[in-house]
Image (spheres, grey):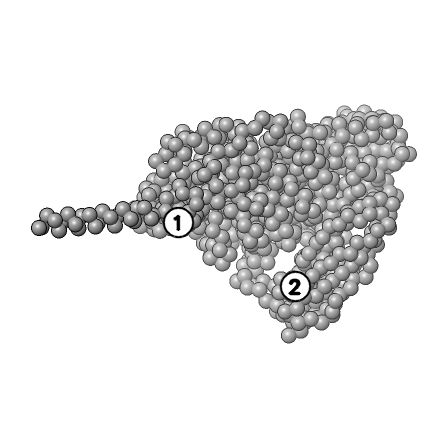
Amino acid sequence: MKKVILGLIALTLFACVDSVETHRTNYKDKNAPIEDRIEDLISQMTLDEKIKQMNQWTYGKNANPNNIGDEMRKVSPEIGSLLYRSTNPEYRNQIQKKAMEDSRLGIPIIFGFDAIHGYRTVFPIPLGQACSWNRNLVKESCRISAKESWLSGLDWTFSPMLDVARDARWGRVSEGYGEDSYANAQFAIAAVQGYQGNDLADKYTIAACLKHYIGYSLSEGGRDYHYSDISRQTLWETFMPPFEAGIEAGAATVMSGFNDISGTPASANHYTLTEVLKEKWGHDGFVVSDWGSVRNLVEQGVAKDLKVATEKAFMAGIEMDMVDNTYVDYLPELVEEGKVPMASIDEAVRRILRVKMKLGLFENPYVDVVPENERYLLPEYLETAENLAAESMVLLKNENETLPINSNYKSLAIIGPMVKDSIHIMGFWEGKGRPEDVETIYEGLRKEFNGKATLNYALGCDFDGDDKSGFKEALNAANSSDAIIVFLGEKRNWSGENGSRSTIALPKIQEDLVAELQKTGKPIILMLSSGRPLELIRLNEMADAIVEIWQPGTAAGSSVAGILSGRHNPSGKLSITFPQTTGQIPIYYNMRESARPKLGHYQDIPRDPLYWFGHGLSYTNYDYSDVTLSQTKIKRDKKLIAEIEVTNSGNVDGKETVLWFIKDPFATISRPMKELQFFDKKLIKSGETETYRFEIDPMRDLSYVDSYGEKHLESGDYYVIVNDQQIKFEIID
Ligand code: NOJ
């Protein structure tokens, strides 16, 4: 009898266990809810397997000289992520196969790389992209970049960079969308949508990474990696909005910055990484450290050794360590000592697995392998590259309609170190762009002006140094031409990471070349390629026309030539202010008013910068009507419509961007002199009129954020500002 009872108990127990087993979600079941799959997987992982998910390995030599260091360690099939520098999709698939088949649980690796402004097709640097004010083109460039990247074995790019940058000495000003928070937020949305598409699990989409969270651009004096003193007010008002917008747009990942934010480095900052990002904004993806930013906590003096650095970074909210191995080396003992709770490890792994699940990597771990000519530089990619480059270029000055080049100019001198360059013109972070893919300015001009004008080329001088031996040849070319086009600029690594400069003027040799050419008395057109705003106070006087072409990338030749010939009508407007001199930094359009507005300016230079944010000319004329408002008094919960008509009264079609600013002249806390709240770009055919409309949502567009991140809308007077028009309206309770 006893035996029978025992047997029955055993049977019942077995049946129970069996039924639990059969109802438990299997993480490999693609039809099960993602969160259940993640829990199932985590429940089966060892601590070692979990920690390996939280580390990013790399191999080979990073294209970025600042990151050279760690050679790839032997690839273990259990690794969480790989910074993948090869362009070979087959190699990626082999590594992935190892992870899928040789690791105990078959967890796919996420492969990341810096495709910042293109992968093989190189688009203009982001600072230039922002000057296009064309959300669609920016989004399209990111979509193309994602496709080229995915077909090369990538799942993830470390882009977009959303550091609102107001100090052009900081080289990384080139990598972001300029000095304004709203502009950065809008391009953050465009970039995330472009990279991630509608569904991360689709082919050709890759995860975006918002960086560098946060306040990195305020590194003191523009010296890269330095301390950044940021009040909570500035943090919320200036730096947070682009990140918040990118998170709302669904960005899968975030990268923590190198900088020390007022004593608590960005990579050890619980407030920004956990309280804001995860708790307030609800981000459910993961944070990766920047290269070495965990290790750097020791240099920054907040950790006495790497173990403490690991604990601080992890507990602050960084889930993945980029290539430093600190998590692998120290987390096991930190867990054992109870300094890092197992629940926190699980939460970090959960976030990483969630991104991998959303990418569909468990079901589709491999990328398609197609021949290179179907992968890169397709005609439509080059067309987008040309259009985005052309729209990013800013016509700063155009005395006597020197541009576009007209038929009176039968011969053109084309002079300067940028003319035949195919390296620097791609800018920093050129991805996998190759000089041989670049159409140089020289090639572009030859095509554009073939049969229309003779081109007389001379180098003139190098980017820097003091060798003036080429000046004579340049003068000869100038003397035998009707107009002189001088192509000056910066080398690619004068901006970008670790690309700080104490002056934003071009080297003297380049300015001297122009001074020499000016002696001919012929019209001088300056074409400037740079990764930052330049100090143009001297060059501005010498030139009849100036175009800032930024670092346009693969389609440099066709875009530059098109701007010069008029095939492209310039439509770029500055996303960042050009100061008179380096000493005028910081100067940006949305500063706060001084106590004595007429006083206190530098005595040796004009009060205003040389070219304000928003400045940019065209080959046509736009006539703006008066701004109309649907009401002049509105309740705080109602919307107000502002409209303006813009007529193209010139002879050529053009694209015009209307920038809408708001001014709040009096509030509980002081407000900037004006703030961009909306922009819109439209094609206006010659002789036609377009209506631009800004629907003002008071809470969204008129409120201010306080130092706790709370929004406040106060009743009273406001102004909507377009160009020189300033129209008052009132918010009532
Ligand atoms: C360091 C840079 O700061 C960051 O922007 C980049 O994504 C990583 N290195 C990886 O290359």
Residue 184 in sight here: no
Quadrant of residue 695 in the image?
Answer: bottom right
Q: Position of residue 373 (x, y in %)?
A: 62, 27
491 above or below 231? Answer: above
Quickly name the residue at label 2.
Answer: 697
Quickly name the residue at label 1.
Answer: 36
Left or right position of 718 against 93? right
Number of marks in picture:
2
Along the viewing direction, whichever of 630 and 83 lies nearer the viewer? 630
549 above or below 445? Answer: below
Q: Position of residue 232 (x, y in %)?
A: 54, 59
First in sequence: mark 1 vs mark 2: 1
Residue 412 in sight here: yes
The residue drawn where x is 84% and y is 30% is: 412
The residue drawn where x is 66% and y is 72% is: 635
139 above or below 480? Answer: below
Mark 1–mark 2 Cα distance, whole angstroms, equals 40 Å
Judged from this view, the residue extending furthest toward the bottom is 733
Q: Position of residue 140 (x, y in %)?
A: 65, 42
The residue drawn where x is 70% and y is 48% is: 133
Q: Position of residue 310 (x, y in %)?
A: 40, 45
As helix, strand or loop, the secondary structure at mark 2 comes to: loop
Left or right position of 718 against 472? left
| Label 1 neighbour load within 10 Å: few <14, some 14-19, many 20+ | some
Along the viewing direction, whichever of 603 and 691 lies nearer the viewer? 691
Ligand 1 has an atom within 8 Å of the beta carbon of the residue at disc 2:
no
The kind of residue tagged 2 is: Asp
Left or right position of 356 against 190? left
Judged from this view, the residue extending furthest toward the left is 1
The kind of residue tagged 1 is: Asp
Along the viewing direction, whichever of 417 and 145 lies nearer the viewer? 145
Which label was assigned to residue 317?
A: none
